[in-house]
Amino acid sequence: MSTSPQIPPLPVGIDDFPTIRRGGYAYVDKTDIIADFVGGHTCFCSFNRPSGFGTTLMLSTIETVYDGDRSLFNGLAIEKRLEEGRFRPRPVMHLDFGKIDVRSGKGLKEQIIAQLFPFAER
């Protein structure tokens, strides 16, 4: 009797790259695309995408590329580039406008500052 390969669990509701990799969840490797895109930009990148298109996971992956655990990329397309030292540590600023109440202008400035403050403390 043959056994079918074990399918890893889907990361439903999980949009944190390290959690997905450490937890053994299924992950569609797009790190080659991320490496090509980010590797060509020296100043900043802006990702403006609607909710539900994987932006948070993509940004979590980019954050981990620049300041995370390199072992999380074992077996992924970007692994060789990391070994070659193509990505040196850099700050990654992640503003999540999904957490900002934009229904009224009241407090908008304060909410944006609240997201920027932890970055400024680094």
Image: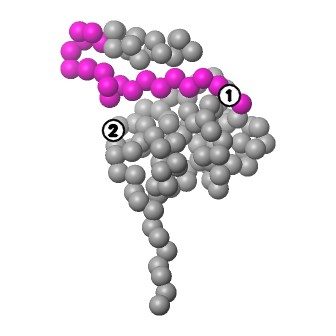
What kind of element bears circle 2?
loop
**Residue that appears at 30% across and 21% down:** 100
Q: Does the magenta run of residues contain 91? A: yes
The correct choice, above or below, for 89 with respect to 3 in the image is: above
Q: In terms of image quadrants, where is residue 15?
A: top left
Give the dominant element type of the magenta stretch: helix, strand or loop. loop
Q: Which residues are magenta?
A: 88-108
In the picture of the structure, the residue carrying the numbered disc 2 is 51
Q: Tell me if mark 1 has few (under 14), some (14-19) or many (20+) residues whose alpha carbon lies within 10 angstroms of its own.
A: few
Looking at the image, which is closer to me, 4 or 32?
Answer: 4
Residue extending farthest to the bottom is 1
In the picture of the structure, the residue carrying the numbered disc 1 is 89
The quadrant of the rendering that contains the C terminus is top right
Q: Is residue 94 visible?
A: yes
**Residue that appears at 56% across and 25% down:** 92
**Residue that appears at 40% across and 36% down:** 49
Q: Amino acid at mark 2?
A: Ser
Q: Tell me if mark 2 has few (under 14), some (14-19) or many (20+) residues whose alpha carbon lies within 10 angstroms of its own.
A: few
Which colour scheme appears in the figure?
one colour
Estimate the x, y position of residue 71 in percent, counting from the top left: 65, 46
What kind of element bears circle 1?
loop
Q: In this image, 68 relative to 50: left or right?
A: right
Estimate the x, y position of residue 14 in percent, counting from the top left: 39, 45
Q: In this image, 9 relative to 35: left or right?
A: left
Q: Amino acid at mark 1?
A: Pro
Estimate the x, y position of residue 43 in percent, counting from the top left: 63, 23
Estimate the x, y position of residue 61 in percent, counting from the top left: 54, 40
Residues at marks 2 and 1, CA–CA distance in whole angstroms = 28 Å
Q: In this image, 9 relative to 38: left or right?
A: left
Q: Does the magenta run of residues contain 48? A: no
Q: Earlier in the sequence, mark 2 or mark 1?
A: 2
